[in-house]
Image: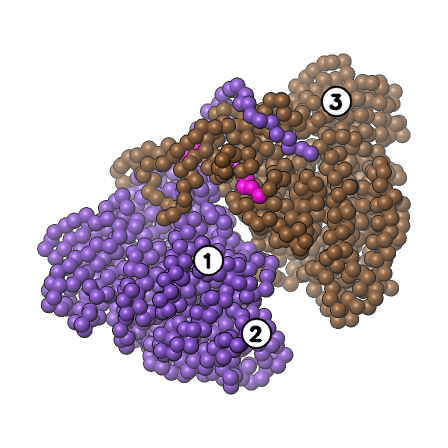
Chain colours: A brown, B purple
Amino acid sequence: MRENTTRPTVLPVAPSRGRLRPLGLDEVRITGGFWARRRHTNETATIGHCRDWMERVGWTGNFRAVAEGRIHQGRRGREFADSEIYKLLEAMSWQAAASDGSGTTLDAETAELTEAVASAQQPDGYLNTAFGHPGQQPRYSDLEWGHELYCYGHLIQAGVAQARARGEGELTKIARRAADHVCATFGPGGIEGVCGHPEIETALVELARLTGEQRYLDQAALFVDRRGHHALTDIEFGRVYFQDDVPVRDATVLRGHAVRALYLAAGAVDVAVETGDDALLAAVVRQWEAAVARRTYLTGGMGSHHRDESFGDDFVLPPDRAYSETCAGVASVMLSWRLLLATGEPRFADLAERTLFNVVATSPSEDGRAFFYANTLHRRARGAVPAADTDSPRAESSLRAPWFAVSCCPTNVARTLAQLPAYVATVDDHGVQLHQYADAEIATSLAGGHGVALRVRTDYPSGGAVTVRVVRSPDHPWTLSLRVPEWTAGAPASLVDPDGTRRTVPPGTAGVTRVFRPGDEVRLELPVTPRWIRADPRVDAVRGTVAVQRGPLVYCAESADLPDGRDVDAIRVDPSVKPQDVPDDTGGTVVVAGDIDAHAERPATGWPYEPLDRPVARSADRTEIVLVPYHSWANRGPSTMRVWLPTAELRTTEPRTTEPHPAEPRPTEP
Amino acid sequence: MRENTTRPTVLPVAPSRGRLRPLGLDEVRITGGFWARRRHTNETATIGHCRDWMERVGWTGNFRAVAEGRIHQGRRGREFADSEIYKLLEAMSWQAAASDGSGTTLDAETAELTEAVASAQQPDGYLNTAFGHPGQQPRYSDLEWGHELYCYGHLIQAGVAQARARGEGELTKIARRAADHVCATFGPGGIEGVCGHPEIETALVELARLTGEQRYLDQAALFVDRRGHHALTDIEFGRVYFQDDVPVRDATVLRGHAVRALYLAAGAVDVAVETGDDALLAAVVRQWEAAVARRTYLTGGMGSHHRDESFGDDFVLPPDRAYSETCAGVASVMLSWRLLLATGEPRFADLAERTLFNVVATSPSEDGRAFFYANTLHRRARGAVPAADTDSPRAESSLRAPWFAVSCCPTNVARTLAQLPAYVATVDDHGVQLHQYADAEIATSLAGGHGVALRVRTDYPSGGAVTVRVVRSPDHPWTLSLRVPEWTAGAPASLVDPDGTRRTVPPGTAGVTRVFRPGDEVRLELPVTPRWIRADPRVDAVRGTVAVQRGPLVYCAESADLPDGRDVDAIRVDPSVKPQDVPDDTGGTVVVAGDIDAHAERPATGWPYEPLDRPVARSADRTEIVLVPYHSWANRGPSTMRVWLPTAELRTTEPRTTEPHPAEPRPTEP
């Protein structure tokens, strides 16, 4: 690993070492296209939406109630509601840093919220509206479920965001006081506990990076090392739920509650990077590999269990019971980004891209004022229209809901979109690396302080051409590296260098090394034609089906696109015919050949299982089936949807009678 | 419907009207075979096992703690733990009635437990160890989750069992006092509530049947009618969880928590039968039909959601996330039995048979001292060996566990096996109907008091021949009816009458009407050859797979039967070859042709999705695969298991490029 020199940039994550050095929000701007639209909606709609809802449901009021000594009269929201204000504050800081206009408005709102938060902090730094005040349970009396340290984690991340984005202010000071209190209370000689929900680990490391204070890093390392030794009491879901079953460095796969697992892994990477603990880093990489290979949906979504919001066993990935929580998507991107910076390996950016387009971008509605908490891959029932004025269940409708009793996802989407430009590019001693493709302007400096500026132009992911124009460059050679996504395997990408020389580039990293001149252009051409995708046969739940992916986008069939009220569950596709882009479209729609099996829509009566030797009844109307990007579904009213599309059933041959197969008899009944 | 005349028989369910009249445990004895072995284990192992565990975990002690005024010092178990003692008491009464030897031992244990229960009953009849005592929440302060009425339901069922099986005793008196208290408290002018867990409805009707007291029936009817009108407050799972979303008579399908839904439906049938409410009965039949057609596993198991133990949406039946709670199986049998008595339709006995053999019989281990709470159809991970001395999670291992924190299933299995002989046969004005096949002796009287006695001999379900010998008969003609199971469709059964005349009989009911003489034999020959079964294509989770059923038994592949540590997930079967009974075996084992795909066992690394145009790698070792009855799995140590067996993957043809399919463009991005 290389050492990163400290620079005053607006960095969400600022490791002191690593293969790649991240760029700040002052160094990368996203100027157009898919993510610019999403970020604009985030700034103009989602942040205010979250702010309004938290006032309305009383979560911001909790802080004032503590200050006024009346919190025992009825605190509002779940035990972790404080954290939502902190996540929103974090989002506001990052967004303000990159804002073209409303930065000052965001700053004013930040100041107002910060004042409320400050009023509830105790003289010793303790800050939580659910515990420790007259009439409440004592501080730290329920580490399993109390979320006090989890809330500090988000507070600290917000404080760091403020310091980096707007300069150290009141929020940063509140966060430091809280962190000092945590070190005093949970440090050596203090409570030997951890939080039921990891999150403070990554936050404390970032605070250490910001302040240079070793004790924050030490405390984070202590929390990481304590977990897995039954630091918490057992619960109904088992200690695996909060990763207290096995120490981080011994675990072989991500497991338990998905968001908890991923936040912990992110924190462990941070600790490993700052302490030079290569064994710990290797352990997390191993867990990431196993989770990606066996416990991840095609969308990048993680976590199939509704019951405990957890990863399931290997290959238990039912699309119609996918939980794939939005926050797990956010956390997965956090983890992948940290692993990318530490290792430089493009596979981490590959997963981040997939997850950003198909999980993070799927959660918010077009207007940014409603959200999916769970991101199922198959919706069979339209469900009720979510309430407009009260919170909604997490996974009960085919429509996004404005708010939830556990409303972690909206603010997590907001803070992710706010810091998104930071994921676009990095630098190292040899040059600049592009990881995510968007219209962007990049201005930074290479080793030795030589300025470099790039302009990226693309209509990705609709189109596959990415043009990088050099605006400013040192006079000596350096390398411009571009990620060639894993999804190009078998459909090769091309790279055109400033001379016009074209070469095929395999998945991984493609680089151009030369003395660049302003005006030089490098062009990456990615084959964003739609393709049929199949799953490992061990993903039993999608056997006999195929999906369509186009570039990084996963597609789906939605009932809104079917004729005459036909339903997605009657679709059968013909995978011998290639999926096609719809001509004259913006690149968003695909059609596939198939039919709609009227028999599959017959009223379901009787017993749904039958001997195989009965003829299969089918009544197929050959048709074209329109597919839309998965992230865009459910913006046209209640609908049903599926990502994995059944192929026509196997033709059943009449069973042949053969001789009995002798085998050892075994008794089966006592 | 016909009126049933009151007779002093040991009847678990004694409707005053209905198409069929049930027989008591004094009229039907199971004398050998599958169910006799299960019942022997129940009597000699399971009942004592439950008794010991409830003493050990302190649930029986709760009653003594109430009596001694120290319950506030630490009541043990969940809020509904009292009900487990009642269910065990019910089991002990039914079992004692049919016992050849240990009835007196069971009576002594009943007396001891009853004394503890009695000591905790309050002067006004209130009886619950979790509420209403000093230091506890007030009575009926949490109808959603408190389970007080639910516990009364099981107490009343135990009291009825005692009265019917052993004559009215102390337990019956306790139950009546409790029921009187319920009527006084929840009757007209009282609390207008219902219990979050239905159960008291069916119990109150049975008490009304026992005592002739109309007010118990009225109270049950009131509880049934109140539900569905938001009688309970909303909860995270929604009111659908406790069927308070829609009135019983308006609902179209069983939904929400499966056990709650099925107990409620059973109670509604009881109310409908006693009050002559045909519309209510029809509503339940409609819900049963819809649930069977769309929300039931091949095993008869109901409920796929782990999160809220509920039915899922139609066709959401993932085998690897099947919950299929044992208690839902018990409750389903209760419901089907009531519907069979009311309507006489054999389809209800068909489902009861399937559920008894594949859910109820699957839960207990061979030794009767460990249980499955959930009955998954696909177990991918061996999991940990359950703790021998503490309670276990409900669905975390491939092995049965001796006890659970929520341990509803063991006592429910015990009371079901204890009353099982009552499910074998019924009478009506025309004769005797056999519904379930087992070695049995039946002695009852037909209309007019004419005695009839039958002896049934069979090795069902290993063999398909059922011989019914007439031991005693009136001198006039009557009809012996035999259920021809639905699973014989396409593989006809035969009936041989006393003359030796053989005829093919279709699924439904086959009857022989004549003047029977002692020694006459009727023989039903059921084709218990193994058959391939497929599912409705809307059961997405089992697409591309087949299952094997042999008679009423569902089969499964278990890793214990595979060579060299190979795993069930690598199995591919060839459904063009008929499954075969293993010769010289007792009829318990089946072999199928197939292969084990070595490629499917490769280490899972990388990304588990790939373009369809890549060649499918398979490495198939042709082999025979041994299948065992599903109910017998997991008796040989930790293993993996699957009911639905993949067929070889579809051969993928190279995609043809065709002309683009024009379609209307639609915008997908804002």
The magenta-colored residue range is A638-649
Q: Which amino acid does label 1 sit on?
A: Asp
Amino acid type at circle 2 is Tyr
Closer to the chain start, of discs 1 and 2, is 2
Q: Where is residue A152 in the image (x, y as percent from the top left)?
A: 78, 55
Residue B19 percent location from the top left of the image: 28, 63
Q: Would you say A12 lies left or right of A642 here? A: right
In the visual, does A255 lie left or right of B599?
right
Mark drawn on residue B140: 2
Q: Which amino acid does label 3 sit on?
A: Thr
**Would you say the magenta stretch is mainly helix, strand or loop?**
loop
Percent coordinates x, y for residue B73 in the rendering: 62, 79
Mark 2 lies on a secondary structure that is: loop
- In the figure, B95 relative to A339: above or below? below
Name the residue carrying label 3: A467
Q: Which residue, given by chain and number where applicable, does mark 1 sit on?
A: B250
As for residue A153 lying within the magenta part, the answer is: no
Q: State which chain disc 2 sits on.
A: B
Tell me which residue sits at (78%, 71%) in the image: A134
Q: Is residue B225 visible?
A: yes
Specify the quadrant that holds the N terminus of chain A.
top right
Q: Is A649 drawn above or below residue B23 in the view shown?
A: above
Quadrant where the image shows the C terminus of chain A: bottom left
The reply to whether residue B157 is visible in this rendering is: no
Asked if labels 1 and 3 share a chain, the reply is no
Residue at position x 56%, y 69% from top? B143
Residue A638, given in percent of the width and then of the height, sits at 57, 43
Q: Going 45% across and 64% down the picture, which residue do you hit?
A: B264
